Image (cartoon, rainbow, N blue to C red):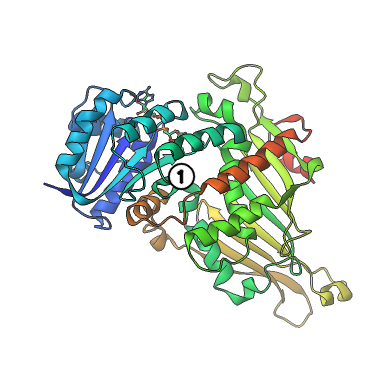
Amino acid sequence: MKNDLIVTIFGSTGDLTARKLLPALAKLYKQKTITQNVKVICLGRRDYDTETYLNEMQKLTSKSLDLPHLSKFVEYFKMQITDLTDYQKLNTYIRSISNEHSKHIYYLAIGPEILADVAKNISESKLIEFNNTNQVLVFEKPFGHNLESAVKVNQMLWNYFDEKQIYRIDHYLGKEMIQNLMTLRFANRIFEDTWDSKSIESVKIFVKEEEGILNRAGYYDTSGALKDMVQSHLLQILSLVAMDPPNLYESDYIKDEKVKVIRSLNIDKKSVLFGQYKGYLEELNIPKDSKTETFVYFRVFVNTPRFRGVPFEILTGKKLSQKESYVEISYHKTSEQEKWNLPLHSNKLRILINPKGAVDLSINSKMPGLKDNLEVVHLNFTTTPSVEGNIPEAYEKLLLDIVEGSRTLFTRWDEIEASWHFIDEIKKCPHSLFVYESEHELMEKIN
Ligand SMILES: NC(=O)c1ccc[n+]([C@@H]2O[C@H](COP(=O)([O-])OP(=O)(O)OC[C@H]3O[C@@H](n4cnc5c(N)ncnc54)[C@H](OP(=O)(O)O)[C@@H]3O)[C@@H](O)[C@H]2O)c1
């Protein structure tokens, strides 16, 4: 049978495939959001058949895989993905199950060390032909480890593929509240008309994690919080919060505005704080003299007419008090608040991204009763539990967008380039490494 959609996963025996890709594909298939005429080819060098493969994948994740559905469209295909000679049989197989209109997604769930070899093999074996947007390549961060290496990876990819064929995944952009940021800003006059330095005093973008590095020592110690979190997720959130409205709600227009923000960042050099949680050096496979940061904080200014002079506080770290990600917008007090000299709070708009989506606006109000007492009250909405059960995982949304050719939630090269410029600048700021035992200690150092 010929398939309309063929997803080929390179590195299909890994964590990403087991925990994210297979569950997302199973759900999209079960809900008939993608064609039922789909084949997912899982490439690996291990000696499995499809049934053994799926059972092995189940062992890699604590959640239950939907094996009845997966076994309908998944097929394990044994080959060595770094060896070009093995691609001939793959190509022959894929041609035998596709038609001229089939969409082909080649998902590289592999580390950066074999990315160049695999990309070259995909091109040389003609699995992807230049400019054919029915044949696309998907890969995950890390997009290099500094500007220089990112440029190299990108130039390598552009040798073989057109930018329109490349999908760079930052899974944070698939989260509901991140997608909602533009709607909140641009589809609500009360926010859009006050979204500038005249009304906004400061902005916080905080992404806190409670856990340590778990079993990611090898990767994490070469990366650290700045590259792992700030270069991708936090700068992406910052650009969505600070950008000017795009002329059209279309991928390239949106990215043009996001890039302008990242290019106009001015770091407050004195504010930079790097931290490492106590016990990091005792984690398995971490060198005893590691200087890798597990916490970063800094203040940055967005040098655009809209936000000039407004400090953006950026914070991310591991082993903090709780898992929580949010954007908090603090508004200036009104001139009456200043004149009356009452203990009135400034309005705050908090957009909670993780662990659940919520929006909370705090306002001042008179307490009901005979006295003139005041209180802060909250206007809020939360994604309710019944809705939450139906909220798609980030990877479902991202995979569906790739199938449909929608590029808004994927990172364009110039966004990555501008981000690395900025990250390299932060690294040059003088900073020491503060060893912390609690979030409280860090907050005291910041304030
Ligand atoms: N896991 C996540 O949640 C996550 C999140 C964001 C980004 N990413 C990125 O996604 C990529 C994959 O992550 P992962 O966590 O799935 O990694 P992983 O668990 O280490 O899996 C890597 C996969 O690549 C294969 N592989 C490694 N070296 C190979 C070689 N020389 N020849 C053939 N196959 C080889 C492995 O095959 P074997 O099983 O045979 O060794 C395995 O299937 C990485 O770039 C990672 O940074 C992952």
**Residue 147 relative to residue 403: left or right:** right
**Classed neighbour count for the residue bearing mark 1: other residues with Cα under 10 Å, few (<14), some (14–19), many (≥20):** some
Task: Give residue 227's position: percent from left, percent from top.
Answer: 60, 36
Q: Which of 126 and 114 is in front in this view?
A: 126
**Residue 87 relative to residue 2: left or right:** right
Task: Give residue 418's position: percent from left, percent from top.
Answer: 62, 45
Element type at mark 1: strand
Residue receiving disc 1: 168
**Residue 75 relative to residue 108: left or right:** left
Q: Nearer the viewer, residue 109 or 330?
A: 109
Q: In this view, does 88 lie above or below 315?
A: above
- Residue 12 visible, this angle: no
Residue drawn at point x = 51 percent, y = 62 percent: 180
The quadrant where residue 13 appears: top left
Q: How many numbered circles are shown?
A: 1
Q: Does the residue labelled 1 lie within 8 Å of ligand 1?
A: no
The quadrant where residue 116 appears: top left
Q: What residue type is labelled 1?
A: Arg
Q: In this view, does 26 lie above or below 152?
A: below
Q: Nearer the viewer, residue 249 or 223?
A: 249
Quadrant of ligand 1: it is top left
Q: Is residue 31 above or below residue 116?
A: below
